[in-house]
Amino acid sequence: MSALRGTLVKRVRKASNKPSEDAYTSSRPGESVRILISRERIRARIQEIAREIRKEFGAEPLHLVGVLKGAVFFLADLAREIPGEVSFDFIAVSSYGKNTHSSGQVRLTRDLDSSIEGKNVVVVEDILDTGMTLKYLLGVFRNRKPKKLRVAVLLDKPERRIAEVHADYTGFSIPNEFVVGYGLDYAERYRNLLDVGILKLPESTHEAPASP
Ligand code: PRP
C-alpha cells in the first residue's frame, strides 16, 4: 500500500453499484476530492471506446502510445479491453511548468522505444486541456509516418482549448475544474485514486492550481 493511499480516508460508500457521489478526504487539512466520475463509469466508458477502436481497425494490429505519467491507468485499462493484437509504448514530455503551456514550450523528455512507421497508432492521453501537448506530439508522430494516427483521451476540457486539436475518442467532456485521480495529479499526489474527482484546496491556499 502506498504512503499516499494510507493518507486518504474514503467516506463510506454504499455497498451497491450506485454511481459514487461521495468524496475522498485527506490527512492534509481542508483538502478534499469530490468524485466527478466514478470508477464504474470510467470502466464502462473505456469498454465502449475499446469496442469503437477495434471496430475502426478491424483485425489489424494496434499500437498504443501512452503519454506519461497521467495516461498510465487509462492505457493499462484500455489495452486490456481491446481484443486482438495490441502493443504499447510510452513517451514523456515536459511543458516547462504548467503555466507556460500556452506558450507552446513543450519538449520530449523520454522518446518511444520503437519505431511507429507503418503502424496503426493510437495516442492515449488522460486529459486534453489547452491542447498544446497533443499538438506538439502529433507533429512529432506524423513525421514518423505511421499508417494511421488516432487520439484517445479520457477527459476533455473544451473550454480551455488553445491549440486546434481534437480527439478521435473521448471518454468524458468535463467542465473547467481542477481534476485529479485515475492518473491525474496535484503536485504528484492523488494519481492513485480509483475515481476522477474535483480537488478542493484549503481556503488559505490563495493560488488556484494550474489546470488540469
Ligand atoms: C497533463 C496531461 C497532458 C497534458 C494536457 O500532463 O497528462 O499530457 O497535461 O495539457 P494540455 O492539453 O494543456 O497540453 P502533465 O503536464 O500534468 O504531466 P503528467 O501527465 O505527468 O501529470
Image (spheres, rainbow, N blue to C red):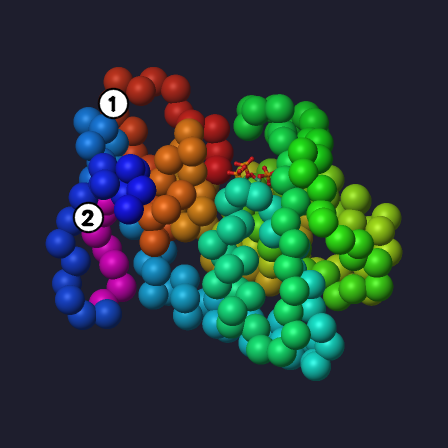
| 114 over 159 or under it: above or below | below
| 206 over 102 or under it: above or below | above
Disc 2 C-beta below 8 A from ligand 1? no
Label 1 sits on what residue type? Glu
- The picture quadrant where one finds residue 133 is top right
Disc 1 C-beta below 8 A from ligand 1? no
Q: Main secondary structure of the magenta part?
A: loop
Q: Which residues are magenta?
A: 18-24
| Number of residues whose C-alpha sits closer than 10 Å to that of mark 1, classed few (under 14), some (14–19) or many (20 or more) | few
Residue under label 1, please give it.
203
Q: On the rendered structure, is 121 left or right of 159?
A: right
Residue drawn at x 37%, y 35% is 189
Residue under label 2, please give it.
10
Camera-nearest residue between 143 and 38: 143
Image coords of residue 54 (percent x, y): 63, 76
Residue drawn at x 51%, y 69% is 80
Asked if one can make out residue 175 in the rendered structure from this viewpoint, the answer is no
Ligand 1, seen in the image, is in the quarter at top right
Question: Does the segment drawn in magenta span residue 148?
Answer: no
Q: On the rendered structure, is 36 left or right of 73?
A: left
Residue drawn at x 72%, y 61% is 121
Marks 1 and 2, how far apart at CA: 21 Å
Q: Which mark is residue 115?
A: none
